[in-house]
Image (cartoon, rainbow, N blue to C red):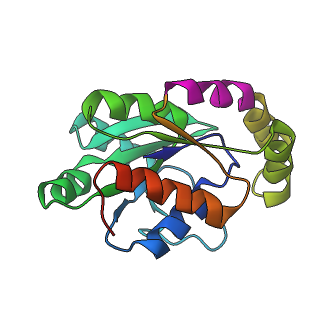
């Protein structure tokens, strides 16, 4: 599982890891927000209504779920369980709140915290990506300290100072746990 603060580049590193090792199963999260430009339902996320998300929670269909920045996000359990039962290693990209829930439900999970080279760089990345503005951006910036502090609860920490280097480090961590490409 790869986690870290908003804007650290989780998606970019995850996509690079998947390009290095397509045998990994990538778990697509469910989100209640609208897609951002370029996002495709079922590829980046499953975009679901609030009502559908409530139904998924009530039916026990999510490994974890959390509210953040005005929407909810969760990991559908069935695809992860099916991949693991088939002996396929699963890669999750998840926020720091969901990581604790995954650790409880999947004790043998490996938690990797992706961190920026500096807090100033993280703020720069959040502002530069241009996906949030005004109050939304301020809410994300207000959570930076909390999200960065969560790193101490992870098995590994990887600095995302350069995508190829960070992805190679993630691959090396996976290999230490018996994953072979």
Question: What residue is rendered at 46% in x and 56% in y?
Answer: 172
Q: Position of residue 121 (x, y in %)?
A: 84, 46
Q: In terms of depth relative to the viewer, which is nearer, 74 or 172?
A: 172
Left/right placement of residue 107 relative to residue 126 reads left
User: In the rendered image, which quarter is residue 117 located in?
Assistant: top right
Confirm whether the magenta stretch covers residue 139.
no
Q: In terms of depth relative to the viewer, which is nearer, 103 or 181?
A: 181
Magenta-colored segment: predominant secondary structure: helix
User: In the rendered image, which quarter is residue 180 located in?
Assistant: bottom left
Left/right placement of residue 91 relative to residue 168 reads left
Question: What residue is rendered at 46% in x and 59% in y?
Answer: 171
Q: Position of residue 127 (x, y in %)?
A: 85, 51
Question: What residue is rendered at 45% in x and 34% in y?
Answer: 155
Q: Position of residue 150 (x, y in %)?
A: 58, 26
State which region is magenta: 143-153
Q: Position of residue 106 (x, y in %)?
A: 26, 36
Left/right placement of residue 41 relative to residue 33 reads left
**Quadrant in which the C terminus is drawn:** bottom left
Is 72 situated above or below 153?
below
């Amino acid at each position: 599982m790869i986690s870290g603060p908003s804007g650290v580049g989780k998606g970019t590193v995850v996509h690079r890891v998947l390009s290095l090792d397509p045998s990994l199963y990538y778990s697509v999260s469910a989100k209640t927000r609208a897609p951002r430009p370029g996002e495709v339902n079922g590829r980046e996320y499953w975009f679901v209504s609030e009502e559908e998300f409530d139904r998924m929670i009530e039916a026990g269909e999510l490994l974890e779920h959390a509210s953040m920045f005005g929407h909810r996000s969760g990991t559908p359990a069935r695809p992860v369980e099916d991949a693991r039962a088939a002996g396929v290693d699963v890669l999750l990209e998840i926020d720091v709140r969901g990581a604790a829930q995954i650790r409880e439900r999947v004790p043998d999970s490996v938690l990797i915290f992706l961190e920026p080279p500096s807090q100033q760089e993280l703020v720069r990345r959040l502002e530069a990506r241009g996906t949030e503005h005004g109050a939304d951006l301020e809410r994300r910036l207000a959570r930076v300290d909390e999200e960065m502090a969560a790193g101490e609860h992870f098995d590994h920490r990887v600095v995302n100072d350069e995508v190829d280097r960070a992805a190679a480090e993630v691959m090396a961590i996976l290999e230490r746990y018996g994953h072979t490409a």
